[in-house]
Image (cartoon, grey):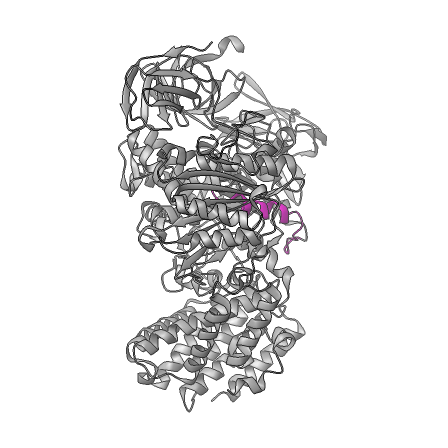
Amino acid sequence: MSDMLLTGKVTGVNGNMVSVAFDDRVTQNEVAFVLTDGNDRLKGEVIRVRGREADIQVFESTTGIKVGNKVEFSGQLLSVELGPGLLTQVYDGLQNPLPELAKEAGYFLKRGLYIYPLDREKTWDYSPAAKVGDCLKAGDTIGSVPEGIFTHRVMLPFAWAGEWEITWTAEAGAYNIDTVVAKAKNGDEERNITMVQTWPVKIPISCYDEKLMPREPLVTQVRIIDTFFPVAKGGTFCTPGPFGAGKTVLQHALSQRSEVDIVIVAACGERAGEVVEILREFPHLEDPRTGRHLIDRTIIICNTSSMPVAAREASIYTSVTLAEYYRQMGLSVLLLADSTSRWAQALREMSGRLEEIPGEEAFPAYLESLVASFYERAGLVRLRDGGQGSITICGSVSPAGGNFEEPVTQATLKVVGSFLALSRDRANARRYPAIHPLDSWSKYHSIVPKDKINEARAMLRTGNEVNQMMKVVGEEGTPTSDFVQYLKSEFIDAVYLQQNTFDKVDSGCGAERQQHVFDKLLDIIRHKFTFPDKDAARSFFQRLRQDFIDWNYCPWESDTFKAGEEKIDSLIKNGK
Amino acid sequence: MRKIYHRIIQISGNVITVEADNVANGELAEVKSGRGTSLAQVIRLDKGRVFLQVFAGSRGISTDSEVRFLGHAMRVAAADALLGRIFSGNGQPRDKGPALQENLIDIGGPSVNPANRIIPRNMIRTGLPMIDIFNTLVESQKLPIFSVAGEPYNELLARIAMQAEVDLIILGGMGLKYDDYLYFKETLDEHGALSRTVMFIHTASDPIVECLLVPDMALAAAEHFATNEGKRVLVLLTDMTNFCDALKEIAITMEQIPSNRGYPGDLYSQLAARYEKAVDFETAGSITILAVTTMPGDDVTHPVPDNTGYITEGQFYLVNGRIEPFGSLSRLKQQVNSETRADHRALMDNMIRLYAEYKESVEKQSMGFRMSNWDDKLLKYGAMFEQRMMDLSVNIPLEEALDLGWKTLAQCFEPAETGIKSDLVKQFWPKSDNADKKD
């Protein structure tokens, strides 16, 4: 192959953009390697071609590159490897396994060091499914291996066009991923199929029958989300908020408690410390749904803020491609991208180096279409075997100055189905999760009937109005009946909207419990209390709040839970 | 012998361009002009042209000044000889000691592999209740003090540094007033900490490019001590806003398209590359970063504090000589405050919540509304809280501060009014304060 290798020479370096005069031909978005004097081989991607010069975005520090250094073009688009063994892995944005890199290079990352994403030695118990003579298309199942609790399908490579007839299949047995497990032919061409295939990250995998409307709620066990601003399996939602509003704590809660098969955490340009928490804790935390460890259903893509910026751009695509791969097996996947703003900033940096005409706040003009096409890779699909798989995408957004008018938030709001607005005021008042109950919205179906939610929402709105009014006319100028409405809205906030993520019980509120507790909440909202004065009303609700919060900390359907409920009932009955 | 270049084809701001070959991106050069010799760094290559950022500024450089490339990037001596020494931003001694040449390492090295990090686990005690109870500082945390000009942020920085239990202190001063530089030197000396301190100081009168090097010099030295010698290092950086302004200046000179208020689009990545050096290792030492970010116009949405806030693990918000409870945040406190004492978290949350309600009552009061019973309770509580918890002169250990918190609550409220879980109330609510309450 080496005689086929296309090469070029460096003509300029500007930040992480390297200009190359190429000898023969280049392909847009193909992977290229810059060879430095220090024998480093630095990976990059062709992002622009002008005349005989190509511009390469290099995924590493460009220090030490000289004009005249050799460049090799690979002919391949930037791709990921797909196969059994992806789960539990911790990758950087280019799918290098970080623990393996640590073994090679020590404390620090070493540039130019790339390692196979999947274990080549490990063997998997393969069972064939397709038979000789079967005519299959890309994405159809050839066989399967168990991967943790999941049945990992080995599929006809997604890139193969047309119909392929199976000509040979391996017997059941333990093989490593590079073993040929089947052969297939299309016309005169016969190809080998192994357990591993590659796929270019920037192209969606679409080997399914059709995309369906997401309807089924994805239970996250966060009350304010599931009840008020629900998310559907296959839907998209975003969590914009200023720093300190609890975006990451919320994402961690989602990654632990959400009722989905697989969670992919894309730590994109954020703090390394936050990923470390997941990295260190998930191997020990029990997944309440399966009894296994959380890490067994998780893939972490970790390109944190101090890692190379260009790889940050790739990391978003890497993670969504892995999500699409598992969706293809009929699983439900939740992709948590934290944060899409950092991804957009990476695009902005590159656009600046390319000296493109800038759009708003110097973001490139094509920002909106890129954001839209990323979220559109989510969805519920019907596979060709009749099964369904889904990808739900949650993108956190970090708007500059907490101002939602900025381009990334606005581009995101256009394409998501649910908007969870995190508010600095609520965070400052320690009202967590700091999702704003009046500003947020969702287009999906809740686990609680709509009319009931409207009742609670109306009370929140009224309470807010009374509160505004009180700021003008004072408490003494407010009728007691209005004041009670205000107390009721504050009560909903304190006992239902707020939730303690750090408490074992309160952090996970299942759908059934939410429905039960919400009905109790409605009883209180509907109950017509009569109080002699405002102080009496306030102290009654303080007591009720105390009992209700204690009740939230009782395990579902335990004895203490029942006792707590009786206590609340009697308090309501005796409440004046 | 390295080749010497004489033809400078462009001088613009602090950036000069020469035609040269076989030059590496990031390499250092010496520029000799009538004014003396300065270091310069290659920041861009374009065919035969090399763009150099001159550390001492381009003033006095002529088109035939000498440029000699050194064949290596900016380096710092990673050795014990650093201790007790003071350097300028370009690594030259500021004190009367000799220049160091041993064990030179590149600055601005690669990021720590996230897989090698561990979850922070050690609290750093400061004796300030606003920090210890409400926003606990944790070893390996990166935390800025958000403030405005005129606030005692350097004093606060120095005080925390003196009280924190660390092995080494590395001070990076950027655009520092000369008085402040002397203040740090004297304070460190008074506490006998000078011998375990390294200082990289860029004062307001030094060339602007050297300001950019300070954090990298300080952090490269910190990484050496943390990884090779297993030391717990505290890095103090003041003031990071000056660093950002230096970045802005260079970016504009290089004709980069500004993104927000003139700052370059990569401001976030530039800051993150420095702050993310804060780390804790299983088998080596740690780096904790405390920085100062002054907010122009007390505006937290200004690009510098805004980008900083997204990178750091919280912030201390210093206003009117006090650490504000709102706006201040330690993201790592959850890692350590569950093990201090059972009541720590609940007390922290509820005291702040009540203080927020107090603020509302104050607002109502100032508008002339009648105060309810509840408002009166809150007003009493708020005044006590500010005096006992927020005052910077308070210096008590955490446990004492927690007890004081319960005492304050008991003096102002009934247990149910505090919203604290009943079992904690049973355990910690002071029983002897009944007499006290009726005053």
In this rendering, the answer to whether A557 lies above or below B71 is below
- With A313 as the anchor, is A361 left or right in this view? left
* Whole-percent x, y for residue A301 in the image: 53, 39
The answer to whether residue A508 is magenta is no
**x, y percent for residue A84:** 62, 35
**Going by the picture, which residue comes out furthest to the front?**
B96
Q: How many marks?
A: 0
Tell me residue A132's x, y (percent).
Answer: 63, 27
Q: Is residue A387 left or right of residue B58?
A: right
Q: Is residue B141 left or right of residue B328?
A: right
- What segment carries the magenta color? A270-290
Q: For residue B247, what is the image quadrant?
A: top left
Is the N terminus of chain A in the top left, top right, bottom left or bottom right quadrant? top right
Q: Nearer the viewer, residue A258 or B245?
A: B245
Residue A272 painted magenta: yes
Residue depicted at 60% across the width and 71% down the height: B403
**Closest to the observer, A491 or B340:** B340
Tell me residue B167's x, y (percent): 62, 45
Residue furthest bottom as drawn: A532
Using the rendered image of the protein, determine whether residue A282 is visible from the camera's viewpoint: no
* Residue B15 shows up from this direction: yes
| Residue furthest to the right | A173
User: Please, is residue B146 above or below residue B322 in the view?
Assistant: above
